[in-house]
Amino acid sequence: MASKTMKTSAIALSAAALLLGATACGTKENNTADNTNAGTNAGNKGDKEVTITFQNIYPDPETPSYKMLHALVDQYQKDHPNIKIELDSLNTDQQKLKLKTQAASKEVPDITIVNPSAQMKPFVDAGLFAPLNDMIDQNGLKDTFQKGLLDYYSFDGNVYALPDGNNIEVVYYNKDLFAQAGITAPPATYEEFIEDVKALRAKNITPIAIGEKDSWTGSFLFMNVLLRTNGGPGFLQDVLDGKKKFTDPEFTDAVSKFQDLIQAKAFNEGATSVDYNTGGNLFKTGKAAMMIMGTWETGAIDASSVGGKVGVFKFPTVGGKGDPDQFMLAPGSAFAISANSEHLQETKDFLNYFMLNMPKKQFELKNAVGSGQIIEGDFKAAGYSDLAIDVLELFKGVKGGDLAFDNTMKPAIAQVHLSSIQNMFVQKVDPANVAQEHQAAFDSNK
Amino acid sequence: MASVKKGLVYLLLSVLVVTQIYPLFWLIMYSLKTNEQILGSSFFSLPTTPQWGNYTDAYKGGHYLKYLGNSVLVTSVTLICVIVLSSMVAYAISRFRWKLGPIVTLVFLLGMMIPMQATLLPLMVIFKNLHILNTRWSLILPYIAFSTPIAVFILSGFMRGIPAEIEESAFMDGASVYRIFRSIILPISVPPIMTVVILTFITIWNEYIMAATFISAEGLKTLPFGIYNFVSQYNANFGAIGAYLVLGALPVMLVYFFLSEKITKGMVAGAVKG
Amino acid sequence: MNVLKVPARTIAVFVLPCLLLYIGLVFVPIVVSVYDSLLDWDSINKAKFIGLDNFKTILFEDTNFWPSVRRTLMYAVFSMAEIPICLFIAALMNRYVRKANTLVSIYFVPVILSVVIIGQLWKTIYNPTEMGGMLNGILTSLGLESWTHSWLTEPKFAMYCLYFVSLWQYFGYHLLIQYTGVQNIPNEIYEAAKIDGAEGFKSDWYITYPMAVPIFKISIVLAFIGSLQAFDLVWVMTGGGPAHATDTISTHMYNMSFLSLKYGYGSALATILVFICLLFTVVINFVFKKVEAKYT
């Protein structure tokens, strides 16, 4: 890497020299750019003007997350007049691209967003993030998190990021549409589940809404099946540990069961060109009977036109295997601090404040379902919906589960997997081939 | 017989008008609908009650004026530089007699073939070392650099067609090359320059990947940020996105219709004679 | 017709500012990319020099590579095939419509619109029946229900649907270029031909088309290079899916560089893309040299 940096710097330097000629043209007004980061000398805090760049994925003013973020940031700036928080709000895909580009040149913003485990590992390995152990001990922040949650963001005993939530994957269903298809109770087994899907189709109702253009959605659902056929969590971990292979029956079974679901026309037609938002809206406008998704959707469902008609159930057992109380777990995207931050201490102080106050603010904004932190509050009294209360009830019964595929396996393997699952939505496949494809990707990207 | 032919031609041309202009109409209808209507109703449907609120949402939530200002600033500085720089190069490679001319031409032609995505990472490193990350320069400079190849391509094509006698007589009269360029070449090159302006304008106005990568400060962001502002992780307000798209396209439409007269005249006008 | 002999200093003044900026920000990055293509690098951690291994893998093992090359070239072929049609229509307009400028401006509208708009629009057209897709709606109302498809998600059709959108969007662009070319043909030539008895389609054949060759070439080059880099539209509409069925070289490259975190591999794809561009531009130039030599 050293030689690479040298090389690029050398090129950049000569480019700089070249550019001098060109910069002579143009206009003066461009010098108004924000330059507060330049020319600071590290020293004690206090009155020093400090700008903290906070890269985040909450750009939509209509969402509670946006309101929470802005409320807390505004408050903090009021309390600390010398600190300016520069919010760089991007949509998820763009943020991922930006962070990777920034990481390549070691330009990570003071605070950024990463996903747990395998997805954040390359960044941690490169030493881009600061350990937060000292910071979470301050003001008792560490104890606000649910037990074990921080493990997903820890490497070699150091915590490198703090999550914005902790969700599980559930089946949301539209009670009215179920009634129309004559379904009286949510299915307890996969076989019943498929019968229900057929009953819904018979009534011309789209059984399950999915936005499979964003291929993680199909994978997230598929992993439920694998979690059951494997008889419990840990299949991918076993593959990583060399104890199992993708060609093992647990995996091929899951593929063929998932294929049964697709072949029963369980999903909206043409799902692979439908993006996540549009897919979700099919359910939220009452055009589909079910949506299998993370519990972060609860608030949005309540706010939609089907709010009040929606119930929730656990993913059923498959072929008699698995425990419905084991879920696909979705520890949230998390805030990490750049190791090279020019204002490391100030940034840590701010993030500490932010994380301590987030649960309360989320609770007020009715966005606390799926919080990663312990919330002492009466949800019912605070006006949370029945659906929200049901979801919270499910949380209490969680007996472990698995992380999403892309949080467990390397990005290169995950991409092969995502495309392989997406393929099942458009054509019939031989489970053995799917397994082979996975195994080959795994072997060549170890 | 002639009139039948003419009728057929007119029919063909009118059908094309409909297919090419319809998206604009569709977008405006889209921007006035609710999420339910957008997802539920058919392609040709009109909004039941126009949701003007979408425009208020878009205007407020998308920092429209601020982003518009930034877009206008970045785009106009870029355009001025592109016009000046690329017309100078075009003049040099189309009129000067020098050994390296063909190579320089080739080097610029090569620029049209370079996929922008492949340059993101190296540019990041360069800008970091120049300390211009998160300033307007980190947009203006690459925009200029990526726009010049096609501009040089079009302008040099035109300039080759300018009769040499004009310059020769001016040269005889003792005018300097700079003078000739400024007072003779530039004025007659206005039409192809307009073409360059509109093509560059369209590309830069809608550019998002570089802007999102090199700019972090809220105060410097450009209009495409606004569009993506509405497409956040777990929510989407389609009507407002539509409204924002209309607002975002408005300046381009205005500029285009203002310049289009000139463009149709100017697009590679000299190439035939050259 | 390079006539002026000027001192080197003057040439430098005219060329250097632009050239240096261009070299620094376009050329240097691509040279860096070529170097990166020799690395096993995730863009974040230590890079390992592996020589031409990435190229070997791409050419001989990557099952997505050749199909994406094929699609990219098809994209280019379709885009270029549109240009004769544009020329034909331009000639018609020149003959039958007195003030065609407004018409040309209208046809140009799709070029101006952001790809986000174009993508949304065509998705609503191509959507499956269940989601109220317009194309299927029309087919159904014509009693052709068996012809309905989920256009963007059936691997057989998806790519052709994308080609079509691109053709539609850039129709105005090439028409504009061709029309200006046709318009610039001096009237005297037509008048002279009229005396010789060449009128209407005949005059098109003997005058308009041959005289439009240089402009035709510009369109061809622009269409070719533009479609080789086709990214935005594909990304917005299908994301290269389903299961890579609509991947082009550039979406494949993006996928590898930024999603699979194989930046070195992605850079190798970028290098190949530039190389293909270069190769075909040389070929096009060569072909047109012959054609022009024949007609002028």
Image (tube, coloured by chain):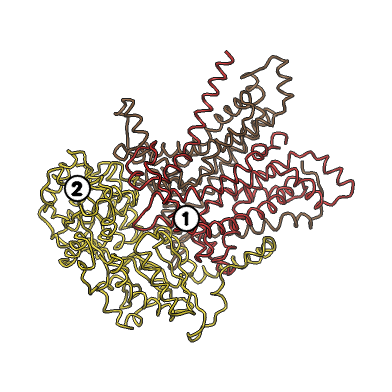
Chain colours: A yellow, B red, C brown
Please say if the residues under marks 1 and 2 sit with CB atoms less than 8 Å apart.
no
Chain letter of mark 1 equals: B
**Image point (21%, 49%), residue name:** A258
Q: Position of residue C28 (x, y in %)?
A: 59, 59
Q: Quadrant of the C terminus of chain C?
A: top right
Q: CA distance from mark 1 to mark 2?
A: 49 Å
> Which residue is denoted by mark 1 in the rendering?
B59
Residue A402 placement: quadrant: bottom left
Amino acid type, mark 2: Ser
Identify the residue shown where x is 54% and y is 66%: B134
Residue neighbourhood size for the residue with mark 2, other residues' Cα within 10 Å, grouped as few (<14), some (14–19), many (≥20): some
The answer to whether B19 appears left or right of A386 in the picture is right
Q: Position of residue A427 (x, y in %)?
A: 27, 41
Q: Is residue A127 above or below residue A273?
A: below
Residue A347 horizontal/vertical position (percent): 43, 77
- Circle 1: residue type: Tyr
Residue A80 visible within the image: yes
- Picture layout, residue C294 above or below residue A140: above
Q: Decide if residue A416 is on the left or right side of residue C57.
A: left
Q: Judge if badges 1 and 2 mark residues of a common chain.
A: no
Q: Name the disc covering residue A256, or none.
A: 2
